[in-house]
Image (cartoon, helix red, strand yellow):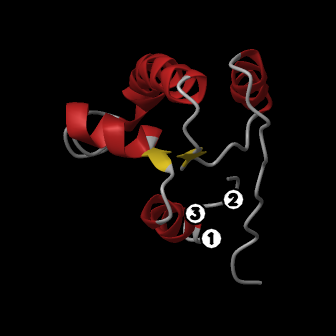
Amino acid sequence: MAGLPGSGKTALSRVLTERGFERLCPDEEVFRLHGVYGVNFPRRVFPTLERSVHGDVAVGLREHLKAGHDVVVDHGFWTPEEEKWRSLAIGAGAIPLLIYLAGEP
C-alpha cells in the first residue's frame, strides 16, 4: 500500500490480516526495536535504522511469499527506491499489487 500518514494504510492492512494475510510493517518494527524517533533516538538516525529494518522485513516478505502466503506490507512506498519491494515480490513468484490510499482531500 502507498499513501501518506493517516491515509488508512494500517486500518486496511489490519482488515486484510483478518482475511488471512500476513502483515509486515517496517515502521512498527523500528518502534519495537528502537523506540520512537525524536524521543528515544534523534530523528536524523531514523533513515539508518529504517534501512536495517527494511532488510529484515524483505527477508520475511520473501519467505512468506515463497511459502505461498498472501502478504500486505504496511508502508508508505513514496520514494523511488521502493521499487525494490516490487522486484522482490516478483522474484519470489508473487504478483505484486500496489494500493494507493489518497486519504482525505
Q: Which residue is mark 2?
A: 3
Which of discs 1 and 3 lies nearer the camera? The answer is 3
Badge 3 marks a residue whose secondary structure is: helix
Distance (Cα) linking label 1 and label 2:
6 Å
Q: Earlier in the sequence, mark 3 or mark 2?
A: 2
Q: Position of residue 73 (x, y in %)?
A: 56, 44
Q: Which residue is mark 3?
A: 9
Distance (Cα) linking label 3 and label 2:
7 Å
Q: Determine whether label 3 and label 2 are within 8 Å by CB.
A: yes
Q: Position of residue 16 (x, y in %)?
A: 53, 63
Q: Determine whether label 1 and label 3 are within 8 Å by CB.
A: yes
Q: Nearer the viewer, residue 85 or 91?
A: 91
Q: Nearer the viewer, residue 45 or 19?
A: 19
Q: In the picture shown, does residue 52 fall above or below 50?
A: above
Q: Quadrant of residue 93?
A: top right
| Residue drawn at (76%, 57%) of the image | 99
